[in-house]
Amino acid sequence: MTDILSEIISRRIKDVEAKNIDQADLKAKHRDRSDFRPFHDALRQNRGRPAIIAEIKRGSPAKGLFAPDLEPATFAGQYALGHAACLSVLTEPHYFFGSFDDLTAARNACSLPVLQKDFIVLEDQVWECAVHADAMLLIARCLEPQQLVDLHGLATELGLDVLVEVFDEEDIDKIEPFYFPLIGINHRNLRTMSIDLERSQRYRSRFSSGQTVVAASGIKERSDIETLMSMGIQAFLVGESLSTHPNRVEFLQALTGL
């Protein structure tokens, strides 16, 4: 695991422990939920055109706070108007400036399925996600194989879709013994923060036709989408370039071709 990832994970564990989460309360709230939105299905319904996971992202470790005036509800409404298939909302507070308040506001403002994007390594975090969101992210680089399987299994049992993110051959080798239906290929080098869209080309063949592959990071224009679609990828997560764009509706429409 890279140094920045180790730092973020350590901080998230401390955050969760400091909250003294009442898992019984979360379980009760989860039992009362009847409003899950099908995240994975929403991506698969866009056959023939790109399915965009539009991200609500205030900042990053590499660039700091780049969208300080972001209004989650407003952005979510604009993303829906721009024909996004789903939303992704950052909830990590220290390095990405996110929160559950952002997720709740965004989800309440539209009918799109919502992915909680965070660094999830503990069971309590899965239960929190199952109360607030429709899907969650698991980063292969951050987890041992058994942790990944256990957290994925719990999330699925609770009704969540799970996007399993990989970065390189090491990550893919780690998850290869298992079958995860929803895979994200991160184009961002976690050590240098540089972008390489060809990662999708190199790694797409490692996954079966039955798995949905999401290309993530560094997508800035329609030509990037077209290049990735030529590799057999139909789903895309767009974050910084969308959160900082002056006209998010038109930008999304251009990306989707609608």
Image (cartoon, rainbow, N blue to C red):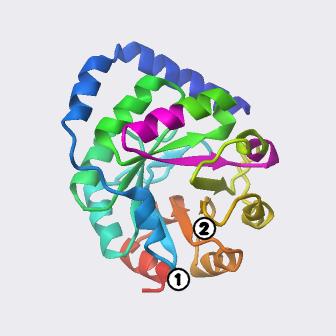
Point 36% across, 57% down: residue: 38
Q: Which residues are magenta?
A: 151-172
The quarter in which the N terminus is drawn is top right
Callout 2: few (<14), some (14-19), or many (20+) C-alpha neighbours within 10 Å?
A: many
Q: Is residue 204 or residue 215 the one in the foreground?
A: 204
| Residue 76 visible in this rendered orientation of the protein | yes
Q: Amino acid at mark 1?
A: Gly
Q: Secondary structure at mark 1?
A: loop
Task: State how far apart marks 2 and 1 are (Cα).
Answer: 19 Å
Residue 69 vs 226, above or below: the answer is above
Q: Position of residue 112 (x, y in %)?
A: 31, 61
| Residue 120 visible in this rendered orientation of the protein | no
Hey, which quadrant is residue 126 in on the image? top left
Residue at numbered disc 1? 48
Q: Position of residue 42 (x, y in %)?
A: 40, 65
Q: Amino acid at mark 2?
A: Ile
For this view, does 171 lie left or right of residue 27?
A: right
Q: Position of residue 110 (x, y in %)?
A: 24, 61
Q: Position of residue 225 (x, y in %)?
A: 60, 76
Identity of the residue furthest to the left in this view: 32
The quarter in which the C terminus is drawn is bottom left
Hey, which quadrant is residue 200 in on the image? bottom right
Point 59% across, 46% down: residue: 164
Earlier residue among tags 2 and 1: 1
Residue at numbered disc 2? 219
Magenta-colored stretch includes residue 194: no
For this view, does 97 lie left or right of residue 78?
A: right
